[in-house]
Image (tube, rainbow, N blue to C red):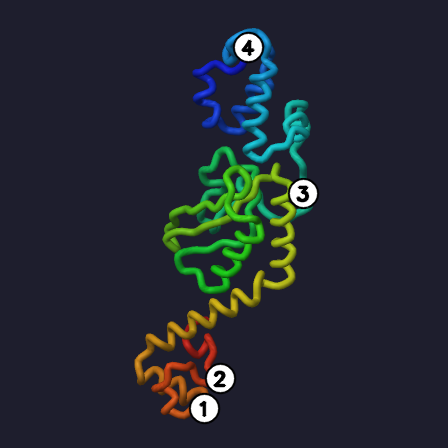
């Protein structure tokens, strides 16, 4: 059985989607001469097609691209990564040359993110099925403002995951909290930790502002009527 040369087999896993597609689009004689140890190239082509499938492509999408047809288009307002910039002072589509056409899910977090952004980011990651190479990836970048930020990008060839991302987009458009219970638990934990760290004078001041007895300042439990705003968390 003829197949890929040993040399080419070694570099195959490291080729980009663009490079793999270019190889499949070559004329048969060029393909055989450079990559195959023998005459027939069927087994070699199947190996390369499988490498693309592992990156999230389907056979139909591969065939369509080789015939010059465009990738599947989605009815979404999500940005392609090539159009994404964290602020107006940053470059669009920074780095990630092989993922410029991926979609950016409308959640992000930074070093300074509060519980809402953290909750939405973690919830979206779970809803998308977790991070998977070539399907859904979390990308972190250093930044001159918040120190670093993270985004979630989705491969447009991964139809099932794209539909989940579009569902997240629709949910966020209707209401800014993806999981109310998760957000509430995170908010309460942060409030409790903040109250625990407060000195007695600060606690007494908050008790006076909220109509609670000053003796409540000595208790571990957060007094009635005290919310995140009073604790300086919003």
172 left or right, relative to 113: right
Residue under label 4, please give it: 32
Q: Earlier in the sequence, mark 1 or mark 2?
A: 1
Q: Nearer the viewer, residue 50 or 147?
A: 50
The residue at the point 42 percent across, 81 percent down is 222
Q: Which mark is residue 211?
A: 1
Q: Is residue 214 above or below residue 189?
A: below
The residue at the point 37 percent across, 85 percent down is 219
Distance (Cα) linking label 4 and label 2: 76 Å
List x then y, in percent, for residue 119: 50, 61
Q: Which mark is residue 6?
A: none
Q: Nearer the viewer, residue 131 or 118?
A: 131
Q: Are marks 1 and 2 in contact (CB under 8 Å)?
A: yes
Q: Earlier in the sequence, mark 3 or mark 1?
A: 3
Where disc 2 sits, the SS reads: loop
Where disc 1 sits, the SS reads: loop
Residue under label 2, please give it: 225
Distance (Cα) linking label 3 and label 1: 54 Å
């Amino acid at each position: 059985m003829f197949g890929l040369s040993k040399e080419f087999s070694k570099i195959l896993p490291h080729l980009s989607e663009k490079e793999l597609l270019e190889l499949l689009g070559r004329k048969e004689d060029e393909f055989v001469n450079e990559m195959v140890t023998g005459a027939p190239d069927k087994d070699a082509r199947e190996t390369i097609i499988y490498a693309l499938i592992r990156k999230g492509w389907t056979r139909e999408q591969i065939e369509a691209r080789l015939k010059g047809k465009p990738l599947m288009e989605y009815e979404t307002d999500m940005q392609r990564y090539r159009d994404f910039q964290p602020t107006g002072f940053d470059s669009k589509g920074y780095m990630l040359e092989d993922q410029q056409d991926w979609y950016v899910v409308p959640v992000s977090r930074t070093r300074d993110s509060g519980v809402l952004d953290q909750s939405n980011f973690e919830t979206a990651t779970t809803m998308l099925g977790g991070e998977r190479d070539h399907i859904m990836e979390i990308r972190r970048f250093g930044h001159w403002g918040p120190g670093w930020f993270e985004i979630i990008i989705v491969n447009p060839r991964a139809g099932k995951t794209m539909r989940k991302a579009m569902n997240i987009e629709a949910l966020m458009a209707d209401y800014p909290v993806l999981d109310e219970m998760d957000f509430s638990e995170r908010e309460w934990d942060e409030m409790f930790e903040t109250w625990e760290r407060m000195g007695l004078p600060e606690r007494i001041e908050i008790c006076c502002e909220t109509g609670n007895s000053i003796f409540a300042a000595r208790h571990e439990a957060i007094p009635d009527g005290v919310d995140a705003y009073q604790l300086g968390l919003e």
